[in-house]
Amino acid sequence: MNKIEAMLAERQLPELLRFADGRAVTKENFEARRLEMVDILCREVYGYAPPAPDRVTATVLKCKEKEFAGKGRVRELSLSFPTDRGEFAFPVTEILPTGAGADARCPVFVFINFRPEVPDRYFPTEEILDAGCGVVRIYYNDVAFDGEDHFAGGIAAMYDRTRYSWGKLRMWAFAMSRVMDYLQTVDYADLSRVAAVGHSRLGKTALLAAATDTRFAMACANCSGCAGDALTRGKAGERVKQIYDRFPYWFCENYGKYAEKEAQMPFDQHFLLAAIAPRRVALGTAVEDIWADPASQYLSACAASPAWTLFDQKGFAHPDRLPVPGDCLDGGMLAYHLREGTHFLSRADWHRYLCLL
Ligand code: GTR
């Protein structure tokens, strides 16, 4: 047993490549296992969402050509779709490299952010355009308010809570999928290169969006930590109790029962990463983000990696040691970087994601 294997053994994780009923997982039946893991995570952590609507309508509210020194077009759109209680709409901002279109399709980031501004400290818009990528930006509070409103507003109010147990993370991820619906109708998107991206609670959201919607070719989860990319068993910093006490509305009620009882969870967060296989996952972590715990984020990637190996792909290519500052491990489909500094979605992180999409 090498060092990493020994560290993983200590965490006593539920087995990844074995169905709940004990059957072994193979390349042929992996999709069924993937769906089982998504189901376990929805049941125990994030809650169940309503089914996807059968249409999404986009209305252009504003259009500015030649923004960012002429390098991009910026449009404000409203996306609306039917729900159980009538039409629900939320605004998005679409930023495209000038010239993107049917003859020049571009990769697209579906980016969910904490603020509506374009650009923003988490959103180096011009640099993304320079890399030839488009972005559709969601402001998360437009979908579901990030606070205790007892699910009385936003998208939560549009469905019966006794039927759908979804918490706010699941609601935000649902909105990312509605952007993906919209992207199916445009001529500019390279649909084989659409990534979900978010930071912190919205990094958790980006992983969930890609796990629940296979149209995403990649998930970029920045500093997502607890209930995101980090293993919960053996984790330093934030754990189920801390996160659920402060943010119960991010989750379904079941998650609370694992506070200080992590060993009883029939899952751990490597399930969430593996549920994106064989597609690409990029994890961004920061040395000073000890609340998220970079070592547990790394070990989670190690534990999820066999889901890719099953497909004869490289999963997480890593040395037999814990990460060190500056590590940038992107030799497989599951990439991980540990940058200097604090909990933040920095240009350095974006540069990694731009290289990988
Ligand atoms: C913290 C929370 C983290 C992370 C962060 C954020 O307070 O404990 O899990 O989600 O917020 O989203 O900024």
Image (cartoon, grey):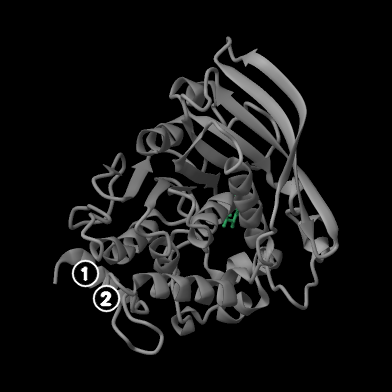
Residue 341 locus on image (x, y percent)? 44, 38
In which quadrant will I find the N terminus? bottom left
**Residue 32 seen in this snapshot:** yes
- Spatial CA distance of label 1 from label 2 is 6 Å
In the picture shown, does residue 100 fall above or below 69? below
- Of 234 and 136, the residue lying toward us: 136
Q: Is mark 1 within 8 Å of ligand 1?
A: no
Disc number at residue 61?
none
Of residues 188 and 36, the one drawn nearer to the viewer in this rendering: 188
Q: At x 74% / y 76%, what residue is drawn?
A: 163
55 lies left or right of 330:
right
- Find residue 9 and name its label: 2
Q: Is mark 2 within 8 Å of ligand 1?
A: no
SS category of the residue bearing label 2: helix
**Residue 345 visible in the shown view:** no
Tell me the quarter of the image containing the C terminus: top left
Q: Residue at x 50, y 59 (%)?
A: 228
The reply to whether callout 1 and callout 2 are in contact (CB within 8 Å) is yes
Residue extending farthest left: 1
Residue at which label 1 appears: 5
Q: Position of residue 128 (x, y in %)?
A: 49, 26
Q: Quadrant of residue 162?
A: bottom right
Q: Position of residue 137 (x, y in %)?
A: 63, 37
- Amino acid type, label 1: Glu
Circle 1: element type: helix
Label 2 amino acid?
A: Ala
Q: Residues within 10 Å of mark 2 (few under 14, many from 20)?
A: few
- Ligand 1 shows up in the quarter that is bottom right
Q: Give the residue furthest to the bottom.
A: 21
Farthest residue, direction top = 69
